[in-house]
Structures are given as C-alpha cells and as structure tokens.
Image (cartoon, helix red, strand yellow):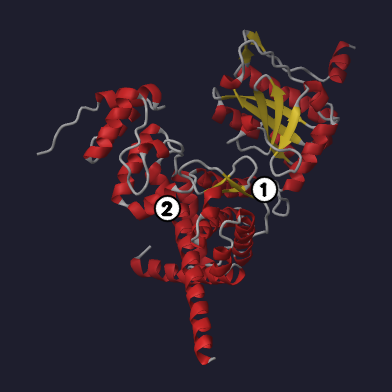
Amino acid sequence: MGGDEWTRGAAELPGLEDFVLVGARVAAEVPQTAWSQARGDPEERERLARMMHAAVREAWGLPLSDALEFQDLGPTLRGAFSLTDGSLRIAEWLLDRDDPSDVLQTLAHENRHDMQRLMLAGRLSHPGGVAGQRELDLWKRGLAEYRPGEVEGYVYNPVETDARAAASGVVTGYWRATAECLAQASESDEEE
Amino acid sequence: MAVRRDVSDLVERLARTGGLDGLQALNVGFQVAEADEDIWRAAQQWARTGRMPDAPRIEGWTPQALAHTWKPAEVFSALMLLRKDPVAASDALAHSPHDLEWVRRGLQQQESATDPQEDLDSAQSVAKLAAVLTESPIEPYLGAKVYARNVPGYEAPPSVAGRQSDLYVDLGRGIVAAFEVKQPEDLEGWFQGKRAADFWQQRKGKRAHLYFVMPHGWTGRAAFPREDIPEGTEVTFLPDTIGNDPVLQIHFVRELSEIMKRDPFVIGGKRARPTAPAWYRRRRRS
C-alpha cells in the first residue's frame, strides 16, 4: 500500500474526535464535581464508576453488562478481563483516587478491548468502513503474531495501541467537556 | 569503552527457573546484558538469589512488582522498555496482557460459528448445556460438579482460572475437564473424523482428551493436561454419557478407538480403552 493510500485509509478511521465525544458523554453522566463530592464514600464512588462504565459501553454500542467487579488486582494492574467468566475487573484502589480520569481511563481501555472482540467476532461493525476492515485485518495479524509473555509484542500490539488511543481520547473528552462546563458556569456567574 | 558482561549466571537461572530452554535463555541473557547498569544489577541479583529485587524503580515500576504479572525473562525486558518508551510501556503494563487473549476470542467465535445466526458463545447456549449436564446421568455418575462460563450459578472454581473453555466439570482429585461446546449442527463434520483427528494431531502429546456426546445431540470435547492427572488415577470412558442416538454412539466409539490406536492414553500404567455402549455390546454378543 502506497503512502497516499495509507493516509487516505487512515483518514477514514474514527480518530481522536470520536473518542473525545465518548468522554464528553461520560462527563455529562458523571461530572467531575460528583466524583469529588463522593470522596470518602466508596459505595458512591463505585456507583459513579459503574455509571461511567455504562456510558462508555452505550456510546460504543456494546451490550450493557453488570459483570464489573472492583478487586485487589495486585500492585501493578489497573484492569483486566477474566478469561474464566468474562467479567471486567478493575483495581479497587482506583476508586480512592480523586482524579476520576484514573478509573475512566481503565474502563475505556478495557471496554475498547471488548469492542474489538465483538468487532472481530462480527457482532459489531467497525465504524471506519473500508479503512475499518483494514484495521480489523491489522488486529487479526497482531493477535496471530503475538506470543503470550512477550512484553514488546504486547505493548506495541495493534490491539493494545488502539485501546490506549481510545482511552486517551475518552479521557481528553472528559476533561474538555468538564472545562467547557466550568467555563459556562463562570460566564453565567459573571452575567448574574 | 563497552564493558563485556558475564551472562552465565543469568542464563543459568533463566534456564533453570525462568521457564526458558537453553537458546531462549541465552538470547534473553544477551538482551539484558545491553541494559542500563541498574537493570543489569537487578538481573544479576535475581540470578544469584532467585528473588526479584525492589530496585530500580522506573516510572513507578520495580522488578518485584512486575514479577506479579510477568515471567522473570520479561521483567527485565519490561524495565528496559519502561526506560526507552515510558508512556506507552507504563500504560500498557497497567493492563493485563490477558486482555489480548480476551480479544482473540472474538476471532475464535467467528471461526467456530457454523451459522451466523447462532451464537455459540452466548450464555444461553452454555446454560442449555449446563442444564443438560446437570440433569443427565453425568453429574451423579462422576460425582462431578459442573461449572459454566457466563452462567449464574455455575461459577468457575479457582482450579480452572485462566482456562478458556465454555464449561467445566470438576471430576475431583484435581482433575477438571474443560468442555468446548459444539452445537448439534456441527456434529456431522465432527464425526466424519476430520476435525477430531486434526485437533488430536495439533495437541498430540500435550493434552489428553475425552470426547463426549451429550444427550440431545450436544457434543463436548473434554480436555485436561496430562500433567494435571495424579499418578494412579483411573480414567474411564463412560458410555452412559453418550446420547440416545445409536448412529452417534457408534461414530463416537469408532472415533475414539481410532484416536486411542494412534496415541494410547496410558495413566498409572493402565491403558485406557473406549467402551462401546451397552446396547451395542449386547447386540454383538447376540
């Protein structure tokens, strides 16, 4: 594939803006102020995190799922899918963090993996059309070549880089929408 | 001036306890020998003591923390990557590498679908089989407990954590049979022997398999690693678990016989043999 063709193909893919919109949607459901107010209230934090989870899944067309658990995942992991029962497991310490984007980033990253799985299974269509099909092919190749336990093969796997980009975009959207909301509130105060 | 590093201790440790063969251990050893001094020291310390040190700390990660998720050989690669590309490595390492296995399941579901309308992996399908198993003679016969993925009330036991099948039967004594669910539509290809034979060839020597035909036309391929089977365990093939369809029963026994001829399944010094259904044995006697 020539450089121009690649550029055209890439241009058709959903980019940062699409992910940013998902983040804005989450910000509307779970504003940063609500997260701050729930400080010291783990049950409320968990409820808010579940709302974020639902908002991300809905925005990406994923079936809604309650199979979300907050657990001790050890000292390094923030999130993981259970290969045994398919539930999504999130490190419980993320609920203690006052920055809501810590838990949102992990939820977005993991749910993007679930979206990839369903797209590869043919249950969801890739929103990128022809370019999306190329991306699916890239994922397939990445998964075929990946040997479990290889750090570099994992970190730079197309499936993993896509999840990172998606999560980064969602978090960007969350903070942009929050900033806009604060700016509007400030303008309203000044008008009054 | 470059300092030549002696990789022998590290290579020996990697080969002895790191799960690598000699050549792999040598490759990893030379790779780690290119690392910064602090990472190299950590590797040397692990090689000498067998304990992962808690230094250096790179982007908040230590060898000890990484060892919770990664094998020793990869711990040092991860540290090198954290230094080279801290943003990407830090983000990726915070999420489980098993996630790629989870995504890969999408491909497996696509490949195994015989009918696009059918959802082989749906909780509904597995629930049906779980119900059949529970109600069938299998559970009382084996004294086994049935577990299924994504089905409330059939939560997987800790002993099957990390395995990827749809349904598990805990046979006791440390043996867990993992079933891969096939729907009745898939039976024809299966029992023409091609798929079973191919599968057997792929896994030959690695896993022992039992093939079941469930009541109502469901099939299950039960597999458990040979090394999981305690010495002296008797494994019996259970004709009573074969469905009611006589054609399927015969196919099943023939298929199993072929498999057993190719690779006898010997446990505790006993050669296991497939057993024909009782009605078939009666007919042959008469």
- Residue drawn 74% across the image and 19% down it: B237
Badge count: 2
Q: Quadrant of the C terminus of chain A?
A: bottom right
Pick the residue in front: A185 or A88. Answer: A185
Pick the residue in front: B85 or A8. Answer: B85
Relative horizontal placement of residue B10, taking residue B123 as reference (left or right): left
For label 2, the SS is helix
- Residue drawn 63% across the image and 62% down it: A51
Instruction: Locate residue B77: give its quadrant.
Output: top left
| Residue count near mark 2 (Cα–Cα under 10 Å), binned few <14, some 14–19, many ≥20 | some
Instruction: Locate residue B159: give its quadrant.
Output: top right
- Residue A29 appears in view: yes
- Residue A156 appears in view: no
Give the Cα separation between the discs numbered 1 and 2.
34 Å
Q: In which quarter of the image is the N terminus of chain A?
A: bottom left
Check disc 2 and give the amino acid type: Asp
Check disc 1 and give the amino acid type: Ala
Instruction: Locate residue B264: give its quadrant.
Output: top right
For label 1, the SS is loop
Horizontal and vertical percent position of residue B37: 22, 38
Which residue lies most toward the right here?
B286
- Residue drawn 78% across the image and 38% down it: B129
Q: Would you say the residues marked 1 and 2 are in contact, meaning their CB atoms lie under 8 Å apart?
A: no
Q: Which residue carries the number 1 mark?
A: B113
Mark 1 or mark 2, which has the lower sequence index?
2
Horizontal and vertical percent position of residue B115: 71, 51
Horizontal and vertical percent position of residue B117: 73, 54
For residue B68, above or below residue B22: below
| Residue count near mark 1 (Cα–Cα under 10 Å), binned few <14, some 14–19, many ≥20 | some
For residue A85, above or below residue B134: below
Q: Which residue carries the number 2 mark?
A: B91
Relative horizontal placement of residue A1, taking residue B183 as reference (left or right): left
